[in-house]
Image (tube, grey):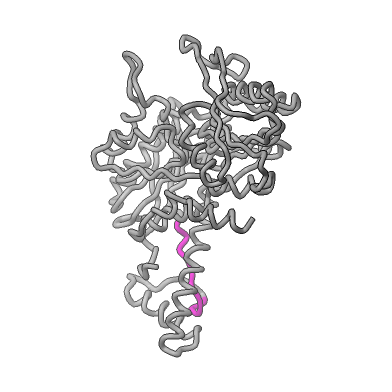
Amino acid sequence: MSSSRPEKLGIISCPGTENFSSEVIYYLKKQYVKKYNRFAKALSEKYSMPLEDVWVAMNLNEDLYSVRANSRKSIDHYHPPTFELPVKFTRFSNGEFKAEIISSIKGMDVFIIQDVENHYPLSVGKYDDEHVLSVNDHLFILFVTMDAARQAGALSITLVLPTYPYSRQHKKKGREALTASWFGKTCEFMGASRIITLDIHSKEIENSFHKLMLENLHASYQILLQLRELVDFEDPDLVVVSPDTGAIDRNKFFAGNLQKPLALLYKERDYSRVSKNAGESNITRIRLLGDVKGKTVFMADDMVGTGGTLIEATKALKKLGALKIICSISLPVFSGEAIDYFDKAYKDGLFYRIIGSNAIYHDDNLLNKEWYISAQVSDLFAKAISRLYHSRSLSPLLDNSKMIQKLLKKG
């Protein structure tokens, strides 16, 4: 581990991201306590000093090189920074937003966390009434926060966006905007050096930037931790199914690591129709390449909006003889009345469980559903933030095959 102190690492939580940010900060503190305890123990053994004396020396050294002495009460163990930067957010009556950073952040590496898919009523500021914010509202809050950090002298700005906005607008079929590319370029122009996201819809998006780096984390390990509680990985009747051609790489990864057969659902769509809810899917025909009769199906996708596509897929698999269907969703948006549609589909026996990450905020209305399981990715983002701050490689997080193989060996 790098022995540099993390005091110059700061986290800004945008409105609606408080729960996820607090979990990320919790795991950050936990990591640093563990690492520095290990570091102090190694020094204690090397110099044959009592551990308490090592901590006194380390804390004294930190205070000597600081502008002022740390306000800690005890000096015989490690005290992690608070990490969270205080920001005052304001929403004006005409819909404009303002972000004001309360403390100095000059020379700090700032990580701004924003959940653009939080569509629950929330207050922007102390005296604001609760409002349901759109994706565009969240984006403008992000923009004014980025500019405030840049104006305040942040050394670097990294955006932590579990959901990359407009990621489904990544290719042209006619005279339409490449909004996924435009968003990243806008962030780059405003001073962001990096974006950390989760299971981005299209990997080609990262090819559209000049200097900005895109770190695409994967929730596969966290999802398999939950899947292990539901199925036996040694079951010969377990099969992985890709819900469409766009998800083939993701499901091929699961099938390869689990050493299970891979099947594919091919969907024909009527693109003249827009799916507004799960009852109005634009899918006209579904074909299966593979065998699911009498099988337990595991099917992974990156995002669920209205849920119509996934529900149609479960219907098709049930008609083809699938015994039990378990789905995983990295980004469970569940927009509109999607939760109600999934409730009905579950009661109709179309699926057994859905595993979704906590990257998008949801209240107990979803989290307490019998059919829904939450996979925690907060620790994954905390590790990514720490590694980037210390200029360490992200490879173990970006390619987690080794971690998955260790998990499978444990059974």
Expressed as whole percent of the image width and height from the top left, the position of residue 384 reads 43, 53
Q: At 33% from the left edge and 24% from the top edge, which residue is drawn?
A: 178
320 or 350: nearer the eye? 320
Q: Is residue 65 magenta?
A: no
Residue 42: percent from left, percent from top: 45, 80
Position of residue 396 in the picture relative to residue 16 (left or right): left
- Looking at the picture, tell me which residue is in the foreground, 104 or 372: 372
Q: Main secondary structure of the magenta part?
A: loop
Quick one: which residue is furthest to the top in this view? 272
Q: Is residue 129 visible?
A: no
Residue 82 painted magenta: yes
Res 375 quadrant in image:
top right
Image quarter in which the C terminus is found:
bottom right
Q: Picture coordinates of residue 204 (x, y %)?
A: 34, 33
Residue at x 45%, y 90% (from the top left corner)? 48
Residue 40: quarter of image: bottom left
Q: Which residues are magenta?
A: 74-83
In the foreground, 146 or 367: 367
- The tally of labels here is 0
The reply to whether residue 116 is in sight is yes
The vertical placement of 268 against 407, above or below, is above
Query: Which residue appears at 36% of the width and 78% of the height?
Result: 61
Q: Position of residue 303 (x, y in %)?
A: 52, 32
148 vs 293, left or right, is left
In the rendered image, the quadrant that contains the N terminus is bottom left
**Residue that sits furthest to the left in the current view:** 210
* Up-down relation of residue 380 to residue 185 (above or below): below
